[in-house]
Amino acid sequence: MLRPPILMVIIGSVFVVNLAGQDCAVKLRNAENQFNAGLVEDVPALLEQCLVSGFTDAEELSAYKLIIRSYLFDDKTDMAEKAMMEFLRKYPEYEISPTDHADFVYLFNKFIVKPVIHFGLHGGINLTYLLGKTSQSLSGNPGEINYYNDNFTIQAGADIRYKLNDRLEIGLEIDYSEVSFKKTEDFLDFGMVEYYEKQRRFESPVSLYYNPKQYGSFIPYIKGGAGVALNLYTDSRSAFINKDINNPVPRTGENVNRIDLRNRLDFMVAAGIGCKYKRTKGYAFIDISTQMGIKNQIIAGIPENMEWYYFYTDDMFRLNTLRLSMGYVFIIYKPERMEE
């Protein structure tokens, strides 16, 4: 329970903040009255402090417009342009409304606001699938070999995008990603080979984004690109499960790093679809995509103990992922005065 002095401090702080807001609202009305009376010289100074703190969003918009019009009315064009630049830095996505005065609109149209860069963070899940498999076995009479993945892995990273025009963007992703799969093989009717592998990777695809149309705040898109993947660590686990009732104990061992027998560098192509939800100075997004590896993952050779103890040998394969990603992108704008 709050003690009375602490409670009084909190109530007093709230009262002061509320009073400051009311005071700025009064100042804005007084400034509007002075402007309407032709006394424009004191309008900027009257509103300056409240632009730092005290206005609501709607009041701040009105105050900026009033200051800009005051400078224009007083033939202080340089000051009006400086105020417009500050206004556009604060509200880079502002669109002219029917209620805006002609002199404000005239100066507004002398500026252009460019989205310099889009920067964001994202994360999601991967589901691995293999292509280009060439099954190999140590058995002279190979049994059934299966690959599957019943576990999702994670991916996370950063986006840097650049807007080329109203429909196209180009972007670079810098990601940490995990991929995994499991292999089983029926071995000579007396056992089953089990092998599990997880790779930790650095991935960096470059993608082109196409936005065909905007529906209110929603912007669907398609994307395609290519990039590289660097294998940072390859964790593996092997086992041989005996079916012989006289020797039922499975052969298992510790996790082994097998990066020396994997191609460290892979190239990939990527494609996907998604949707953005536009917000002020940015957007949230969700997309689903696939990244398909180009190079075979296997380097010839395998530890001897994996062959005679687990009866396991590597198959050739290309590593691919199906990805679901979500994130948020912030847009950095740069307002500029257009050349006359």
Image (cartoon, rainbow, N blue to C red):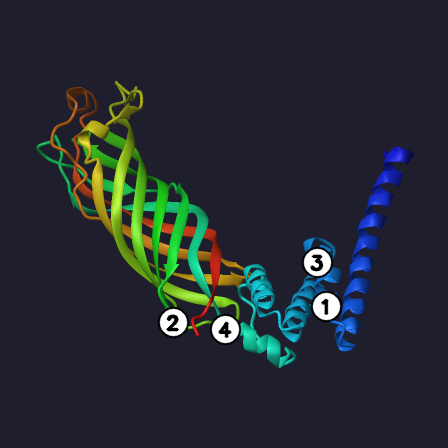
In this figure, which residue is indicated by the disc labeled 1? 41
Asked if residue 337 is positioned above or below residue 2 in the image, the reply reads below
Does label 1 or label 2 sit earlier along the sequence? 1
Q: Is residue 227 left or right of residue 74?
A: left
User: Circles 4 and 2: CB distance less than 8 Å?
Assistant: no
Where is residue 309? Give x, y as percent. Answer: 20, 20
Comparing 61 with 325, the one in front is 61
Comparing 92 with 204, the one in front is 92
Does label 3 or label 2 sit earlier along the sequence? 3
Residue shown at 24% from the left, 23% from the top: 244
Does label 4 or label 2 sit earlier along the sequence? 4
- Figure quadrant of residue 254: top left
Q: Is residue 331 left or right of residue 290?
A: right
Does label 4 or label 3 sit earlier along the sequence? 3
Under circle 1, the secondary element is loop
* Neighbourhood count class around disc 4 (C-alpha, 10 Å): few under 14, some 14–19, many 20 upward: some
Residue shown at 68% from the left, 70% from the top: 66
Residue shown at 41% from the left, 57% from the top: 287
User: Circles 4 and 3: CB distance less than 8 Å?
Assistant: no
Residue shown at 16% from the left, 36% from the top: 298
Under circle 4, the secondary element is loop
- Figure quadrant of residue 19: bottom right
